């Protein structure tokens, strides 16, 4: 039974087999053919695009004794090539991620003067070289500048901006590019044919797109999808393996964004999450879809699906950019579900917040207790006030306006849920327990109660409870948005411009 990973089994064995990096391989073959070999190279680029593979090919070609003169390529048959394929004493690979100290580089520096055992060069391949410490880079500098004639250094990194300029200036730098989707698809199909894997076109496209230019990731996914028996690798199987959300749910959210329907968006998200989808993955898929829509709006792509074309016909490029920007923040958030829900509610809001004047005078400093909030009101008698008694529901949007200035996300969530009012108490009916707990956090309650005290002129107690039927209808959200705009106009002045 062959347990070798596919990405190792199908690693390039010759410069001609390197895909997508012709600008690098042609230059290296030309240099090898003419004998103009540098003492140090720097390979930069994303992960999985062939940096280490090309470094090994270069090392093998330098010591090859069986190739035609001036060919500039390893023959893969001579003793030196065969030794390099297995394990050669003249090719030393160093992982800078785990050997990044000054002592590690000093040890290398002490050994570099030792002559090669068989070939003409001793080649040092230092992977992830950006992980070296500042002291290690300084220790490497002198050796890199004036190495022995038999020593060649090949440095590889995914983060070229972390390489000191003093190191870069002493190397020949080659920038590796992400592999195009077409090249990845063709390569995957060739491997699938060789391995007798039934890979359909849709699955190959999905794998290639998910790999984002990385051959290694794409081949790794195909290896993971290698079926038992004669079952075909389908796009649906790939989506299940990668934890992708149902495309119908993603389409429903996108359509809700176009139609400014927050209720439909929240319900679609809830259905996907209940089915096991991860909020961050939902955001990733939405981001990729809206990137396609943006390109379609700008006519920057030739191949457009019918769904993408339909969305592109209903939005502007600026709208696409706003959606992408909001969704990207969700991916990095530790509260991914809450961030996703808040983002779509904002994006579906039909009324935008009006241009405000400086709000430092409108928003009180955070109060530690309702008494402190009452004291803040007393110190600012010109602020909005209300008579004691039962809370007037019509004044609640003014609380949201004040809260939004410094707690925009909290305001967005509050706007989603209905509230009950009684004497000096507001009860927020949240649909989800984690939203209830979020509202009841001391710092969040404090912020809401402070804003409420400013509006109603007295301490107000705010409490959140769970109510599974709390999701308001679409018209309720629309009216809430209108009320918020009206409150902002009353407090801040100005007018709405279409």
Image (cartoon, helix red, strand yellow):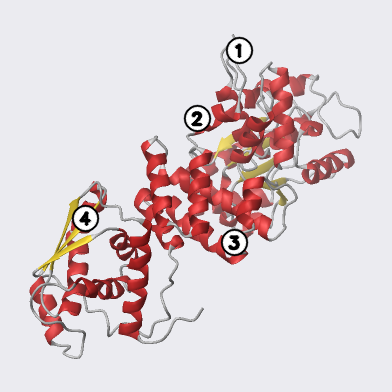
Distance CA(mark 1)–CA(mark 3): 52 Å
Label 1 neighbour load within 10 Å: few <14, some 14-19, many 20+: few
Distance CA(mark 1)–CA(mark 2): 26 Å
Q: Is residue 421 left or right of residue 308?
A: left
- Secondary element under disc 2, as helix, strand or loop, is helix
Distance CA(mark 1)–CA(mark 4): 59 Å
Looking at marks 4 and 2 on the same chain, the residue that comes earlier in the sequence is marked by 2
The residue at 38%/57% (across/down) is 474
Label 3 neighbour load within 10 Å: few <14, some 14-19, many 20+: some
The residue at 59%/22% (across/down) is 5
Q: Position of residue 344 (x, y in %)?
A: 43, 56
Label 2 neighbour load within 10 Å: few <14, some 14-19, many 20+: few
**What residue would you read off at disc 1?**
2
- Foreground: disc 1 or disc 2: 2
Q: Are marks 1 and 3 in contact (CB under 8 Å)?
A: no
**What residue would you read off at disc 3?**
315
**What residue would you read off at disc 4?**
429
Label 4 neighbour load within 10 Å: few <14, some 14-19, many 20+: many
Q: Position of residue 431 (x, y in %)?
A: 26, 49
Q: Are marks 2 and 3 in contact (CB under 8 Å)?
A: no
Looking at marks 1 and 3 on the same chain, the residue that comes earlier in the sequence is marked by 1
- Secondary element under disc 3, as helix, strand or loop, is loop
Looking at marks 1 and 4 on the same chain, the residue that comes earlier in the sequence is marked by 1
Rendered view: 313 above or below 115 = below
Q: Position of residue 321 (x, y in %)?
A: 56, 62
**What residue would you read off at disc 2?**
240
Rendered view: 307 above or below 367 = above
């Amino acid at each position: 039974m062959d347990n070798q990973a596919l990405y190792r089994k199908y690693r390039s064995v010759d410069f001609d087999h390197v895909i997508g990096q012709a600008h690098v391989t042609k230059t290296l073959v030309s240099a090898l053919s003419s004998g103009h070999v540098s003492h140090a190279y720097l390979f930069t680029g994303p992960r999985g695009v062939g940096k280490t593979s090309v470094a090994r090919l270069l090392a093998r070609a330098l010591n090859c004794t069986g190739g035609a003169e001036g060919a500039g390529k390893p023959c893969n048959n001579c003793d030196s090539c065969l030794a390099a394929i297995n394990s050669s004493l003249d090719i030393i690979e160093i992982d800078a991620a785990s050997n990044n100290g000054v002592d590690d580089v000093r040890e290398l520096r002490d050994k570099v003067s030792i002559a090669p055992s068989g070939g003409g060069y001793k080649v040092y391949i230092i992977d992830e070289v950006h992980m070296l410490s500042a002291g290690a880079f300084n220790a490497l500098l002198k050796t890199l500048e004036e190495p022995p004639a038999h020593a060649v250094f090949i440095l590889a990194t995914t983060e070229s901006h972390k390489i000191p300029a003093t190191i870069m200036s002493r190397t020949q730098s080659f920038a590796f590019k992400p592999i195009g989707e077409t090249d990845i698809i063709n390569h995957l199909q060739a491997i699938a044919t060789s391995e007798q894997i039934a890979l359909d076109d849709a699955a190959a496209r999905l794998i290639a797109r998910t790999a984002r230019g990385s051959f290694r990731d794409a081949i790794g996914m195909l290896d993971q999808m290698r079926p038992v028996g004669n079952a075909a690798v389908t796009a649906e199987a790939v989506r299940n393996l990668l934890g992708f959300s149902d495309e119908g749910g993603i389409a429903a959210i996108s359509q809700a964004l176009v139609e400014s329907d927050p209720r439909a968006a929240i319900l679609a998200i809830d259905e996907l999450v209940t089915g096991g989808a991860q909020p961050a993955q939902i955001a990733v898929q939405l981001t990729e879809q809206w990137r396609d829509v943006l390109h379609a709006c700008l006519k920057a792509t030739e191949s457009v699906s019918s769904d993408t074309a339909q969305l592109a016909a209903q939005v502007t490029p600026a709208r696409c950019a706003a959606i992408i920007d909001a969704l990207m923040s969700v991916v990095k958030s530790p509260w991914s579900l809450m961030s996703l829900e808040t983002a779509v509610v904002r994006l579906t809001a039909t009324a935008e917040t009006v241009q405000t004047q400086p709000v430092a005078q409108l928003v009180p400093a955070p109060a530690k207790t309702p008494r402190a909030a009452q004291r803040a009101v007393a110190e600012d008698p010109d602020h909005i006030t209300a008579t004691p008694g039962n809370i007037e529901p019509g004044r609640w949007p003014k609380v949201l306006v004040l809260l939004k200035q410094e707690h925009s996300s909290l305001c967005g969530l509050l706007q989603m849920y209905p509230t009950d009012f009684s004497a000096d108490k507001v009860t927020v009916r949240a649909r989800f327990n984690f939203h209830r707990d979020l509202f009841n956090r001391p710092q969040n309650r404090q912020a809401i109660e402070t804003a409420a005290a400013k509006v109603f002129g007295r301490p107000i107690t705010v409490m959140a409870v769970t109510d599974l039927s709390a999701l308001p209808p679409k018209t309720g959200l629309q009216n809430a948005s209108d009320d918020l705009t009206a409150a902002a106009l009353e407090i801040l002045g100005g007018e709405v411009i279409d």
